[in-house]
Image (cartoon, rainbow, N blue to C red):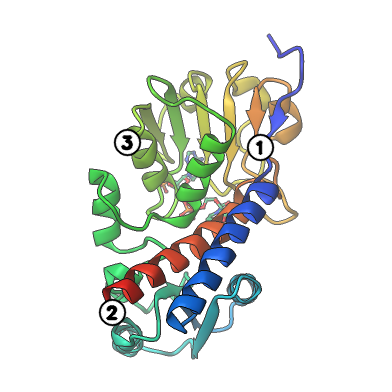
Amino acid sequence: MTQTQPARLMEGTHLARRIIGTGAAAADRLRQRTGTAPCLATVLVGDDPASVTYVRMKRARCEQAGIRSRHVALPASVSTGGLVETITALSEDPDVHGILLQHPVGPHIDERAAFEAIAPEKDVDGVTTHSFAAMAFGLPGFVSCTPGGIMRLLDAYGVGLSGKHAVVVGRSAILGKPAGMLLLGRDATVTYCHSRTTGLSGLVREADVLIAAVGRPRFIEGAAIKPGAVVIDAGYNPGNVGDVDFESARERASLITPVPGGVGPMTIAVLLAQTVEAAERQLAAG
Ligand code: NAP
């Protein structure tokens, strides 16, 4: 059974632009009121081309939105201790309101220790255990940006979540796991799938809301999707290809994110929005 109409697109590009516009206006008001613009510190270890590009994009978007960025580039050879020291200094610097550690940081570094050096009030990328716990308990705090962006997309397109079966394929700490927790917090019934899951396509077929966060090009085919499902493709693989086979999935889903232009732009938008919010809170606290 297929849909009579192909799925409507969930346009992250447009929504992200609106969120960044709202953030820029708030950053400007804050600067006028306090004389200080929000500041995001970006920390990059080594010179992996993809990481360099991601950080450059994030900084450029910040500057367009009136958010200052302070960039710290460290050699690939930096030790865990050296990286922790750098991040601790940024955590203690009152002129920095948000901290982004671009990952991966290299196999010789204890990435978790580096993330934990980020002060919770500056954890605008939502990577610390403090932020994850707050999110899981439904307490205030910053969420991991890509899952946060997914929730904003679902809300913007009026997708009801209560009682819906959400299937999340992928369980990484930055994407799949927090996405499932946020969906659970909105009363969805959540199933996680991962590399050891058996009967994956049967589980995917039960999804009212499907989140694909696998990192494998066109891993989920249209035939595996329940007619009328909402499909969020967080995957971003070489050649601008998602984790869902877009053409066949579009014939089955009611709503679907394109790749590119779906989830991707939302990640940066949430990062910027959370940086402005962090600055507002820190400057209000004096
Ligand atoms: P990751 O850390 O590599 O995690 C991939 C997850 O997929 C793991 O949980 C893994 O299971 C699961 N998996 C791998 N092969 C599988 C299989 N055959 N069947 C079922 N599950 C399988 O990747 P990630 O960082 O979460 O990223 C996932 C995708 O999202 C990538 O394409 C990435 O580029 C994209 N992404 C996009 C954004 C954005 O801003 N748009 C941000 C972050 C990531 P195990 O846990 O069992 O290994």
Indicate the amino acid at tag 3.
Gly
Label 2 or label 1, whichever comes before in sequence order:
1
Kindly identify the residue that appears in the image at 48 percent across and 41 percent down.
151
Q: Is residue 38 visible to the viewer in this orientation of the structure? A: no
Q: Is mark 3 within 8 Å of ligand 1?
A: no
Q: Secondary structure at mark 2?
A: loop
Alpha carbons under labels 2 and 1: distance apart: 40 Å
Is ligand 1 less than 8 Å from the beta carbon at label 2? no
Earlier-in-chain disc, 3 versus 1: 1
Residue beneath label 3, please? Answer: 185
Q: Nearer the viewer, residue 235 or 228?
A: 228
**Residue found at x 45% / y 30%:** 167
> Could you tell me if the residues under marks 3 and 2 are in contact, i.e. CB atoms within 8 Å?
no
Give the residue at x 39% y 86%. 95
Mark 3 vs mark 2, foreground winner is 2
* Residue 11: quarter of image: top right
Residue 265 lies in quadrant: bottom right
Residue 209 point in image, percent of width and height: 51, 27
User: Around disc 3, counting alpha carbons within 10 Å, would you say few (fewer than 14), some (14 to 19), or many (20 or more)?
Assistant: some
The quarter of the image holding the N terminus is top right
Q: Where is 239 relative to 54, above or below?
A: above
Q: Where residue 221 sits: x, y (%)?
A: 65, 29
CA gap between label 3 and label 2 equals: 32 Å
- How far from the left and from the top, in percent, is residue 80? 32, 83
- Is residue 174 something one can see in this rendering? yes
Mark 3 or 2 closer to N-term?
Answer: 3
| Residue at the disc numbered 2 | 286
* Residue 138, placed above or below residue 124: above
Determine which residue is flagged by label 1: 10
- Mark count: 3
Q: Mark 1 belongs to which amino acid?
A: Met
Q: Residue at x 43, y 41 (%)?
A: 195
